[in-house]
Structure formats: C-alpha cells, structure tokens
Amino acid sequence: ARLVAGITTLVSAVGVWGVGMLFTVPALLRMQRGKIQINRSLDMGALLQAMPLVVVNFLVGTATVIMALLALLPDRAFEWHAPPSMGRLARDVVVWPLVADVVFFYVHRWLHRNKAMYAMVHKVHHSWSAPGSLVAI
C-alpha cells in the first residue's frame, strides 16, 4: 500500500508540477513567440497568490486518489512481482483514461453547481484571463 501511495504521489507530482512548470516557463520568461493570446501576460502577483490553493488542491486530490485506489482496487492489483498480462494492460489503457475523464467531468460540474465550493475553490480558476497550467485547477 505504501508503494502505491508513493508511486501515485510521484506520478501526480511530476504531472502537475513538472509538466505544469514546463508550460509556465515561457510565460514566466515573458516569451512572445508562439503565444496564442498576444495581448495577455502572466500576472506574477496573482500566480503567487493562487499557489497556496493550488498546493492544497494538489494534496487533497492526491490523497483522495490514493484512498480511492486502496479502497476500490482488488488485492491482486497490488501484486507487482510480475508485469500485467497484455490483456490487462490493454484494458487498463482504455478504461482508466475514460474513468478519469468521467470523474473529472462530475467533479468539475459539482464545483460549478455548489456555490460555496465555487466561491472558495473554483472561482480562482475562472478569474484567469491569461492561461497558465498551474492554475488550470
């Protein structure tokens, strides 16, 4: 179980912070080449103000995923002494992105319908006029 928690946290961290920073670096460096929104730029003050919420969302989201994986997956899902069969791998490659997309849709919909959560969490996401991957929560 610790291994699953560690790997899940590592993959989440690399995905959110690694890839997020890669997409944020051009904005931080004020690069103009390849920009979609020419007249908009990153507001560093707003980014720094949003970061505590981004970190909390990341930690809560990662903890929720770990708990869900530990609670919902069968014990054989944690047997890592042999690689999965091609059938299981093919199934997982198709099923898990679909599951993630459906969960994302319903959580996002809930954030819009629940006025308290919208005001407390999701409104920050909609306050950005210049795109930035770290605040795309």
Image: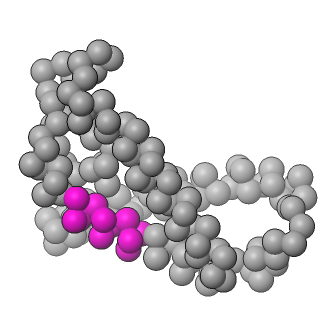
Taking the image as shown, residue 62 lies to the left or right of residue 55, namely right
Q: How many marks?
A: 0
Q: Residue at x 17, y 49 (%)?
A: 47
Q: Residue at x 87, y 72 (%)?
A: 81
Q: Is residue 58 magenta?
A: yes
> Observer-nearest residue: 12 or 129?
12
Q: Is residue 63 visible?
A: yes
Taking the image as shown, residue 35 lies to the left or right of residue 67, namely left
Q: Is residue 133 magenta?
A: no
- Which contiguous range is marked in magenta? 51-61
> Observer-nearest residue: 99 or 86?
86
**Quarter of the image where one finds residue 5:** bottom right
The majority secondary structure of the magenta stretch comes to helix
Q: Is residue 132 above or below residue 60?
A: above
Image quarter hosting the N terminus: bottom right
Residue 120 is situated, as x and y percent measured from the top left of the image, at 16, 68
Q: Residue at x 9, y 48 (%)?
A: 45
> Observer-nearest residue: 116 or 34?
34
